Image (cartoon, rainbow, N blue to C red):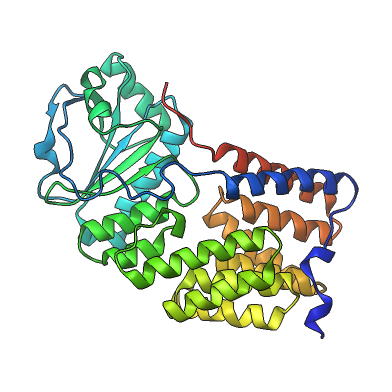
Amino acid sequence: MNDSRHHLSALRPRSGVRDLAIVVTALACAALTAPAAGQGETQPGTGRLAPRLTCRTLGGLELDDRALIGRVTVLLFGELHNDRTISAARELEQILASPDHADLRAQAWLIVAREEDPARLAEAVKEAGLSIPVAQDIGRATFARYAVRVLPTAVVVDAKGRIVHERPGFTYEFRQIVEAACNLAAGLISREQFELTIAPREAAPDSAELNRAAALTAMGRRLLELGKDGLAADKFIEAQKTLPGYVPAHVGLARCYLVQGRLADAEQELQEVRARAPDDVDANIGFAAIALARGGNELETAERLLSSLRDVHPRHPEIQFMLGRVFEAQKRFDEAMKCYKQAAQLWRHQSLEPTP
């Protein structure tokens, strides 16, 4: 089969699905080009001693900064009436309950600032089905010391009481990044390994090679967005030469090859990623895109892969969008429309929510 015949741009949506797909694509571009909070800057609190806690548990006990010493701690700032806080708390509970992280001996606290009777807050915790311990910030002083402006905000602190990572907002990457930050706090991975886990635009690389590779990859992504796939490919290749095995550069080059219809080359790049990071979400989306471009019986392969990814990452908009394209190619237009709508909602809801 001639790969050059399967240019992704030829897979155009039909009728009403096409119109909604255009809207979704516009939202995607806005999400990619809008400046993120703190973009281009290092995390302001990373490396410093965690500010003082002045909180009270729902049982009436004082919670101060002594609670941060001796164990990895995740402080989740939020409110019980905030859906994203509840979602983040549930994912945090799953991280700490996993047998894979038994050696962390980590603890977590949900810190709320709402002035309400502790008994009513305890009832709200029960209704939400949460097991994470909750503490009330007294006079919003702790929120102010940690400069919390987004609900929720997760702060990972090591056993010496130093901030390892601050994560504002809740998106589909929340669990992956907080999990990696806990491993970093426990000394199980290096700072460089942690930076490779998070998106390059959020990274504060420690090495010159990693810094340059991340910058080249960011340039390549921007060029690809502008339709300059040839120039983008050059940047991704240069990033690979700068830091061999840099996963985001392999994924970016694979996307270039997909746009050019070079499916075999794209697959080879993604196989490189699979060898290093078999669970990489972007790489697996790329494999699904290859199957979609090939069509025929490969559509079932794409559907199975994307459905499995959606089970693990239900809040990932690109997975929903790609699944919609698969359903559309299978002429399952109602299911395609549903996926496109869900993708649009997820892209829209991923904008950070400011605190009241």
Q: Position of residue 90 (x, y in %)?
A: 40, 42
Q: Position of residue 288 (x, y in %)?
A: 67, 68
Q: In this orientation, which residue lies closer to the viewer: 33 or 151?
A: 33
Residue 82 appears in the rendering: yes
Task: Tell me which residue sits at (33%, 32%) in the image.
Answer: 148
Residue 279 appears in the rendering: no
Task: Tell me which residue sits at (72%, 69%) in the image.
Answer: 259
Question: Which quadrant of the view contains residue 38?
Answer: top left
Residue at the extreme bottom: 1
Q: Quadrant of the C terminus?
A: top left
Q: Check the image and report above or below for 124 versus 12.
A: above
147 to the left or right of 308: left
35 to the left or right of 101: right
21 to the left or right of 344: right
Task: Tell me which residue sits at (54%, 63%) in the image.
Answer: 219
Question: Which quadrant of the view contains residue 209?
Answer: bottom left
Q: In this orientation, which residue lies closer to the viewer: 259 or 158?
A: 259
Q: Quadrant of the N terminus?
A: bottom right
Residue at the extreme right: 15
Q: Position of residue 207 (x, y in %)?
A: 31, 69
Question: Which quadrant of the view contains residue 308?
Answer: bottom right
Callout count:
0
Q: Position of residue 8 (x, y in %)?
A: 77, 67
Task: Tell me which residue sits at (29%, 64%) in the image.
Answer: 206
